[in-house]
Amino acid sequence: MSRLPSSNRTPQNPIHNEQGAALVIALLAVVMMTIIGLVMLNVVRNGFINSASSEAEIQADMLAQKGLDEALALIKNAVKEGNASTLNYRSKVANVETNLNENIDRADGTSNDGIYSVETSVGDYKVDFSLDTSLDAASRTQVIRNPNDLGVVVPFPDDPYVHQVIVTSTGHTGNGRPNRTVTKRMKVYVSSIQPVFRYPLSAAGNLKLQGATAITGDVLARIPSGCPAPCGDIRVGNVASFVKGPGTSYTISSDLPSIRGFIRAQGSYYLNNTLTPFAPTLFSGSYKPFEDRNLTPDQDIDVEAYVGKQVDDIRLGQLSATATETMDAEQFGGYKAGASNGQPTIPVSRLYDEQWLDVTGDLQVNGNLILNEGVLTINKVSDTQATHVTMQNGSIYVKTPDPHLVAADLTGSVNLVNRSASMAVEGNTTLTNFTLNGNLFVHGDLKIIGNLNVTNGSIFVDGNVELKEMTSINQGTDRPVILAASRRIIMSDNQSSTQVRAFLYSRLEDLSLYGVLSKLEIRGGIHGKNVELNAVKGDASKTSMAGTVAHPSSGYFFSANQTSLPEDRSRLKVIYDNSLYTNPPIGIPITPNISVYVKEITYQ
């Protein structure tokens, strides 16, 4: 039997094997701890860097804001000194304008370019009043309107003063800190325009927003003097009301209203009639409003005084004293004028005393047109040809002998060429598919049938206003019309889709608008004693359409899934019109003092 060969290997000591393994583990642990330490050190280091960077960003923002605050204080000081200097409106405007220009031009005490820089311990900020005339009009400081440019002519109401001030402030950090730069821009209007025209929606009482009304701009409900509680409240809900005819009333579930802007209720907030603190969740849409308790309260416009003054000025002799012809002989059917009646021109101021005047065909009047105890009718020539009346250098005054008659029944157009001229009517007035250039004052009720265009002017009514069978107001013009009434503004029998470029103002009465069966877009604003808006989103139809569901009792069909539809599908939109300040119509109500209005602050 042979032997197995013997091995040359020396048996290993298990103790040595264990010591080697322990050494490897220890080395790995040291490496891991080193890596973790380096990672932690890097995290801490980055934390310090990020903290310093965030602090520098905040400081740069604060420096930029400090520049805006200083600029605003400079503007307010110029206005305060100008308002205190005199009782005369135009003199105040002149003094404010002088003070404002001086303060801006010499902002740094050494130059007149409206630019200055300030060094601080944490960095610096630079303020630029954007006086560079090469900038576009919306981006530079400029005078938009100055009544003193009219010379000695003082129209009623007087022209507004609007000085747009653009301030750009850049904050920069350095001095051993991370370099960060923040630029902010502030648009300010130094103006005499009534504060109510800052808001697309306001009430001297309560606001009630039922359903999915979409509002772009700031919203205000104030508590006027003597207003009984509850007052100054904003009530929102997701159930809209609507009527189908006289004596009918329905409700429909929709969505909450949406507001893209700031909001202020001097009273309280309610959600579906439950008292609740303000919260953005009270509203729907991708944009939520922020509450601003410092929104400037609006002021009442004394429509009765506006109308009364203008009517009195004319009646007490402003026009009749200049009449060079008097037409008082009895004429069966009244007097005739206009191209279709063989009289295209009235060469002088003319008084029709206790007579009617019928105008058909174009007419030019080279003076004033006065109807005392009479009626004025302007007719269309045919279904395709309107009558155009041009007041070359005068005003129109009409007074009816019977308060139940229509004192002025007008279709076509009236052009008041002289900026200080106006049209005043003592009696009820009807405008049918009418175009006006200038201001209209009505002591009575006004009915607007069809479309209305006021190219540059305002309408004041001491009475009620009814908008009937209307599809548009001021569409295609470059500014809204001011339509101010002492009493009610009623929209009736209007088309399914209506566009209104106007500011609707009712001083003493409630105002209710509906975007349920009808579709309404108002670009301008709404103001009333109490305002109620009702709206849904999407389609409304008498017949079934794709994506609609039947309303259980009205017989109409409405878009389904109201809460999932975007706010731009609202059937009632109220959108602020910036041209109320950038291109204000003549006659826009003003205040005796100049005020400062911060329109916006944006990051650049």
Image (cartoon, rainbow, N blue to C red):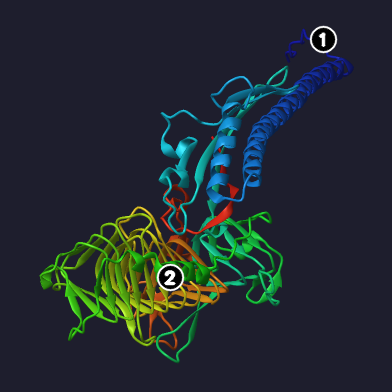
Q: Can residue 167 be seen in this view?
A: yes
Nearer the observer, 21 or 263: 263
In percent of width and height, residue 33 lies at: 80, 22
How far across and how far down the image is residue 394, in percent?
Answer: 31, 60
Front one among 597 and 212 = 597
Q: Is residue 173 left or right of residue 488?
A: right
Q: Which mark is residue 316?
A: 2
Compare residues 75 and 59 and report the one nearer the observer.
Answer: 75
The vertical placement of 310 against 178, above or below, is below
Which one is closest to the eye, mark 2 or mark 1? 2
Q: Mark 1 points at which residue?
A: 10
Which quadrant does the C terminus fall into? top right
Q: Is residue 487 above or below residue 33?
A: below
Residue at disc 1, secondary structure: loop
- Relative height, residue 86 to residue 552 (above, below): above
Quadrant of res 388? bottom left
Three-letter amino acid code of the residue under disc 1? Thr
